Amino acid sequence: MTPGETPVRQLFVVVERDAARMRMRLVPVQDGGERLPAINGGLGIVPLETLGQGDHRPLTELYHVFRRLDLSGVPSAGEERLASVLAVWEAALARSGIGVRLERRALYGAPLRRPDARGISLRPWDVELTALAAGLRTLVKLDQISPGRVEALRQTAAQRALRVEVVAPAGEPTERGTSVTLLLARDASALVEARDLEALLLVPGGAAGATAAMVRMGELLGYPSCCVERFTRVAEQNDATLAWALLPGVPHAPAPPLTQWLQPGLALLSHSPCDLHCAASIALGKRILGAVEATEPGFAARWRSFAARVQVVDGRGNRMALVVDGRLDSGGTVRAADVLASGVADAEAETDARRLVGRTLSVESGGLVAAGGGWYAPYVADHRGGSSAAP
Ligand SMILES: [Zn+2]
């Protein structure tokens, strides 16, 4: 068995003390895996999302409790091990007045990596500038822009009557100079406000008022308030944590393609919607699609042919858009599989995709597995829904 063939599992739990609640994951420790704040016996715990309005600081004790657990009596492998460790942890937490309950089982996947430029991408490079020009947002923020690209972007902005501001270099200097963050807006006052918010958000360790600044920044960027509110609760703002927090396990009601965000190359939105059925995100997506279609007739149909599918990142990190006949919960058949971007460890992504065609998929622990084994996908978003979502 090579990596990516045998599903690995994780557990989602909710911990609670008084009004403080938090969603967490109990995961296997893997080579090249994620940063885990507490590890014991080959398993780790990682926070996902805060829930409710309580003070969450008293919950930090749960990490110490986890590190000190005596796990000598639990089975050494398998799903049984996860459940047994949870039971031992639960008993220990109870003595500290912290409750924990199992929310769901899930397939485990390595942290998501941003796809490189070689894959299939239908997202127009300037979709955010198009949305800005159409009045669908007040601000565009472009991170990690190399010095070489700054001048080209300045010219594009000038052609479109947009103002640009370069904010203090962020990140490590590279061989080609230091990358910068660019802010673009139609009017100067928005740029001034955004620059001040950005300074507040970059304070190491988090400045007072950082959450309020994030909410206001989200507003300027045109993100729906429900999505920004959820975003501020997610423990880490990286793609994998957002995916575990915001994507429900399958089967879920097929969502319209407009809210697709798992595959960056197909995303029209710049934010991660609070829900695949978020009405504000669907409305925004419709207007963005309409604005792009107006500048590039035929775009919507081409984009929809890839976006209105079952989107997955499989166990090897391959990003695929699957055409699946039938409901996922009753065993759908793969009719087409396109690799949008291959995982770093998999040179055989195209072959894997061809082998999937004609096979039946079934739902397991919130993810998908191919009948007969050899392939599974922990990250899944079903975007085959909502014909009413047409522009
Ligand atoms: Zn929302």
Image (cartoon, rainbow, N blue to C red):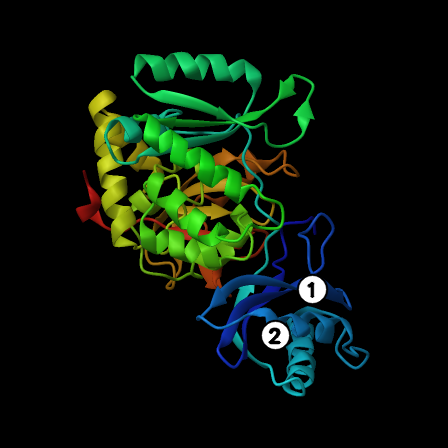
Which residue appears at 67% of the width and 25% of the height? 173
Crowding at mark 2 (Cα within 10 Å: few <14, some 14-19, many 20+): few
Residue 383, image x and y in percent?
A: 34, 49
**Residue 164 shown left or right of residue 372 in the figure:** left
Q: Nearer the viewer, residue 113 or 203?
A: 203
Mark 1 crowdedness (10 Å alpha carbons): few <14, some 14-19, many ≥20 = many
Residue 275 image point, x, y percent? 36, 56
In the rendering, at what x and y percent does residue 320 appear? 47, 41
Direction from residue 189 to residue 199 in the image, left or right: right
Dot 2: element: helix
Mark 1 beta carbon near ligand 1 (under 8 Å): no
| One can see residue 387 in this view | yes
Marks 2/1: CA distance? 20 Å
Q: Secondary structure at mark 1?
A: strand
Q: How many discs mark residues in the rendered view?
A: 2
Which quarter of the figure has residue 46? bottom right
Which mark sits nearer the N-terminus, 2 or 1? 1
Instruction: Give whichever of 267, 218 is nearer the camera.
Output: 218
Quarter-wise, where is residue 249 in the image?
bottom left
Which x, y percent locates residue 257? 31, 44
Which residue sits at x=56%, y=20%? 146
Q: Look at the picture and state if 122 lies above or below 7.
A: above
Position of the C terminus, as image quadrant, is top left
Question: Which residue type carries mark 2?
Answer: Pro
Using the image as rendered, state which of residue 221 and residue 70 is in the foreground: 221
Question: Residue drawn 53% across and 49% down?
Answer: 237
Which residue carries the number 1 mark?
A: 44
On screen, 257 above or below 365? above
Give the image quarter of residue 287.
top left
Q: Which residue is mark 2?
A: 58
Look at label 1 and name its amino acid.
Gly
